[in-house]
Image: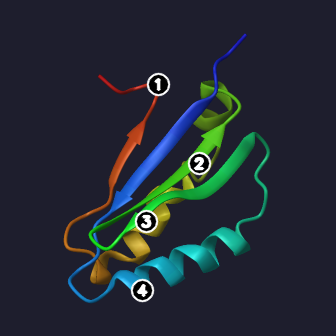
Amino acid sequence: MSQTVDVTAVFTPLDGEFFRVKLALDIAIEQVVQEPGCIRYEITDAQEDRIVLTEQWESTELLDTHLRGPAVQDLGESLSALLARPAEVVRSDQAA
């Protein structure tokens, strides 16, 4: 049986942009259509200097065959103007 896979993104807002980034992530979470195989999609930590968003998938196979890939990657690209650096995306099945 396959293990679940967490895809975690750390967003580092520019100074003064925390609330705009957090609001954009909150809205995105509300608008995410439940993707087949995606179990959970939520902010798991929010501090002034970083926001952590995690999506959990039923299995590596479901994530790898998903056409768009992890939603956190798309969010990182769409919020790039508000971030101090690109979102750091880590998959639990590929972590060192």
Q: Quadrant of residue 73?
A: bottom left
Q: Amino acid at mark 2?
A: Glu
Q: Give the structural element (helix, strand or loop) at label 4.
A: helix
Neighbor class of circle 2 (other Cα within 10 Å; few <14, some 14-19, many 20+) is many
Q: Nearer the viewer, mark 2 or mark 3?
A: 3
Q: CA distance from mark 4 to mark 1?
A: 31 Å
Of the numbered discs 2 and 3, the one sitting upstream in the chain is 3
- Which residue has dot 4 on it? 19
**Image height of 8 relative to 60, above or below:** below
Q: Nearer the viewer, mark 4 or mark 1?
A: 4
Q: CA distance from mark 3 to mark 1?
A: 24 Å
Q: Nearer the viewer, residue 67 or 32?
A: 32
Residue drawn at (45%, 30%) of the image: 92
Residue drawn at (70%, 66%) of the image: 32
In the rendering, at what x and y percent does residue 9 appear? 41, 53
Q: Quadrant of the N terminus?
A: top right
Q: Quadrant of residue 84?
A: bottom left
Q: Nearer the viewer, mark 4 or mark 2?
A: 4
Q: How many labels sit on residues?
A: 4
**Image height of 63 relative to 34, above or below:** above
Q: Give the structural element (helix, strand or loop) at label 2.
A: strand
Q: Quadrant of the C terminus?
A: top left
Residue drawn at (27%, 75%) of the image: 83
Q: Amino acid at mark 4?
A: Phe
- Which residue has dot 3 on it? 46
Q: Quadrant of residue 48?
A: bottom left
Q: CA distance from mark 4 to mark 2?
A: 21 Å
